Amino acid sequence: ADGTISFADNNITNVGSISLDSIVSDASPSVITIGHEGSPFGNDSLIIKGNVLIGEDLGDAFNADSVLRIQRSNDRAFLHFKTDADQESAILFGDVDDDVECAIEYEPANKALTFSTGNNTEAVRIDENQKVGIGTGSPDSLVHMSGAGGTAVLTFENPDAGLSTNETIGKINFETQDSGGAGVNAYIKAAGANTSGAAYLAFGTGTGGSPSEAIRITSSGGITFNGDTATA
């Protein structure tokens, strides 16, 4: 009379179609609810308590922490979000204390993808020109960092507990695909000056694929040119 069919530990098969508001199984622990008007999660809800597999069961183990798995054999598997041109789509992450704490969101109006953390505050943006903004929503270059109070810092770390002489701490390479000499043709490198934690900064230049050190700033502040020692 109320438009609900309830069943325990049984199957409904070969019925063609069912037209009703909900189908509920009281078999513990599995519960399946297909809701329409009056659903606790809004209209047209699907509530499944338990793990869900979409696609093919290939017999491999189901990760106990994976509530949803999409799997296909001999084919690709995509998860596709599609909305009207003025509506965003997102994957939201939250907990019982905060409904949305982090998010990955697509903005169709800007053709941009954003990553949010810390109470859903935007942290990283990739715009329609593939420019990446960290701390800024308007990146001016391929990578643009913005941080108040001098916090826009790029850190390179070598985690080795015993740094050896000439061991690289961090390095920036400059590369070209020029037909006359493709490859890395310049660099800036920080490396160990000794085994006592000191470091030097080297600048290298040359042809594609084979740059060599041109200038070094030593750990004591001196400067060498092509290996010849000079004072600053």
Image (cartoon, grey):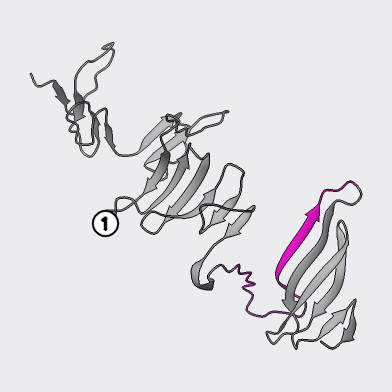
Q: Which residue lies furthest to the left in this view?
A: 1
Which residue shows up at 34% across the image and 39% down it? 51
Q: In which quarter of the image is the C terminus?
A: bottom right
Residue at the (85%, 51%) spot, across then down: 182
Confirm whether residue 1 shows in the render: yes
Q: How many C-alpha atoms fall within 10 Å of the one at disc 1: few (<14), some, or many (≥20)?
A: few
| Spot occupied by residue 137 in the image (x, y as percentages of width and height) | 51, 52
Question: Which residue was labeled with disc 1?
Answer: 97
Q: Label 1 is placed on what type of residue? A: Asp
**Is 155 included in the stretch rendered in magenta?**
yes
In this rendered view, identify the residue nearer to me: 107 or 206.
107
Q: Position of residue 86 (x, y in %)?
A: 42, 33
| Residue 9 seen in the current view | no
Q: Magenta residues? A: 154-179
**Is 175 on the left-hand or right-hand side of 20?**
right
> Percent from the top left, x then y, of residue 176?
81, 52
